[in-house]
Amino acid sequence: INFNNAGLSTEQADRIWMELRKAIVQIQNLNAHELRFEELYRNSYTLVLHKHGDLLYTGVKQTVKENLLKVSSVVSNTVNTQLLEVIVKNWEEHKLVMTMIQDILMYMDKTYCLLKKKEPVYSMGLLQFKDHVIMEGQVPKRIKSLLLEAIHRERTGHGVDRLLLKKCISMLVDVNVRNTDVYRAVFEDDLLNTTAQFYQNESQNFMAENTVSDYLKKIERRITEEETRAGAYLDKTTHPKLRDVVQRELITKYARQLVENKSTGCVHMFAHDKVEDLRRMFRLFSRVPSTLEHIRNSMSCTVKESGTAIVKDTENQKHPKFFVKKVLDVRKKFDTFVKKAFNEDRSFTRDLKESLEYFINLDSRAARYLSHYVDDMMRKGLKGKSAEERDRLLQDVISIFRYLSDKDVFEDFYKKHLASRLLTDNSGDREDEKTMISMLKAECGHQFTSRLEGMFNDIKISTDMMSDFRNQRRENANDTDINVTVLTTGFWPLHNTENCNLPVEARTAADAFGAFYKSRNSGRRLTFQTHSGTAEILCHFKRGKKLLAVHTYQMCILMLFNRAERYTFAQIQKLTNIPEKELGRHCLSLAHPKVKVLRKHPNSKKLGPDHTFTWNDDYTSNLYRVKIPLMSIKSDIKETKVPPTVEEERKNRVEVVIVRVMKTRKTLDHNSLMSEVMKQSLRFSVKPIFIKKRIESLIEREYIMRDKSNRGVYHYLA
């Protein structure tokens, strides 16, 4: 058929359309192999070009409808067992047909449909399939029923044709072209409802019949199955909705019940180190982040309860080593849970830290206990350990130290214990001591450890000084040997006590060193701390000589017996000038039934001025060098109050902070000043009443003053 460009009559247009219609019908009958698509394209192009687009579009739409009515009849009459296969087969054929029709009507799509705002041919065909096949009569209900039944069968362990389900569900998604309304109305909404009901029933049975551990395993398997199922044939928009439904029914509803189950819940898992079960619970609960709070609360309560029991245990109060060891065991145990079960989650790490801090600081003695633990460890606990093991033990101490609120109390006791170890040379390894101080310095800064480092420096200087002193005295070998450690005031925990009367031999050696020291350090004052020294004296007994290692006070007592064999307690006190309390302890130690260097009359623990002590010439021991143990006094670790020295230091520190703040701000109201002080890093917990008392003290001493018109405002006094 030949046309010129002058125009195209209605009759000519009708004839062209009829030719095109025949071709479309052939395509619908899947008999398109004899068609000439290039000619069909030109014919459709001609109709659109000569303004007959309405004829073409309406005709195509009607032709598609007529064919789909036939398909609808076939689908409606298909039995349920074959319905999905039949509708999917017709759907795929229809898409193929519409693709071929779209190819010959391409020009109409680009011009006429765009101008007239009509659906493109392919989309129009899909929408027709929706209207005349899928949504026809009972078909949508039947499709929904068959799909839901297939999914239920799969959930209950039966096999299904996943490919067929995927194609059918994809048809529901694609058929509405621009949205998934059909998919939601026909299938998705009911899928979510039936899923909720299915797992509601199943979870109730699971909870009634299984332990928490078994329940978690089953729901983990169920969730995995649902995710696999969703990926296999459900639309991607359904995945999060289905996941939320499943997680709500299996996890959210029972999260608290699972955690708090008395026989197999979290407390049971913590007690029996069920790391794998806790890891599975955390992994599942992480899907619903709000449920993790139940696990965290359970962990916190368990840690606090375990810790409180440790604090209240009277045996632990008697033995600081046991207290710290048990605290470390709790920390290590729950730290393992946080790392291995809870994936080092920040919120779990934070809650564990807060829980440990809570019970460790229930008793102010915790700081003292930790210092005693370190003292015991440094003296003998690290011997024979590898470098890695020693480092781990020191790190354990630092981990507990971090939780202490009264770090200044720890510092006070640690300084005393370190001084004792250094002065008696009773530390296992000086390098371990230095490593410990380096760790404390890293935690709290140079100011915290400056005195401790000064103590080590004194020891080093003293060692060098004693070497020079001995070289100077070498020519006189009969002089009493003396070893002096010069301690810098301010570094060491020294007590101002009156010196005892040293024997002539010891006094001569001490004076010699004093003269040597002053010759090298003019302007410095040297004071001997006789209450902190030790001595070795050679004693002659009937059965031979013995070298006794004693305290300086005991040396003074024993040297008296070079002049007489018997002294009363009052006489010894007068001759030695040793404080009465200390003298009693040292005398009783020498007369102890297991020692008996001296004999006491009457033989009792009580002391009176007229009680006598006699030299025991019959003393014997299998050892040549004998260390005389010193009777212990009532341990200060039973005290619950802050040591007086620490209390005074706290007052000074808080006052320094107050003055510094006021000097900067000049004028400040009470609440603001309290807030500023509380923000400072003080190395101890401070209560508002404590700060208030320090403010009052500073007002009395005229560092600051109250405002005359408003007593709640303070002014700095330069």
Image: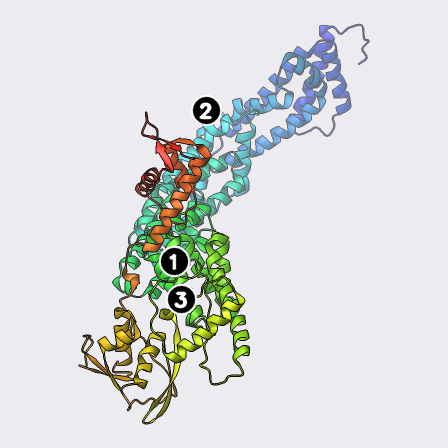
**Image quadrant containing the C terminus:** top left
Residue 63: name its quadrant. Answer: top right
Residue furthest to the bottom in view is 543
Q: Is residue 88 visible?
A: yes
Residue position for label 1:
412
Instruction: Check the picture and name the quadrant holding the N terminus.
Output: top right
Q: Is there any visible trace of residue 295 in the rendered image?
A: no
Q: Nearer the viewer, mark 3 or mark 2?
A: 3
- Residue 564, image x, y percentages: 27, 86
Mark with earlier residue (1, 2): 2
- On screen, 386 above or below 504? above
Horizontal relation, residue 610 to residue 281: left or right: left
Element type where label 2 sits in the image = loop
Mark toward the start of the polypeptide (3 vs 2): 2
Residue type indicated by callout 1: Asp
| Tag shown at residue 137 | 2
Residue depicted at x 46% and y 80%: 481
Pointer 1 with pointer 2, Cβ within 8 A? no
> Crowdedness of circle 3 by 10 Å Cα count: few (<14), some, many (20+)?
many
Tag 3: residue type?
Asp
Instruction: Check disc 3 and report the residue beneath it.
Output: 375
Quarter of the rendering containing residue 370? bottom left
* Disc number lying in front (1 or 2): 1
| C-alpha gap between disc 3 and disc 2 | 89 Å
What residue do we see at 48% from left, 65% from top? 433
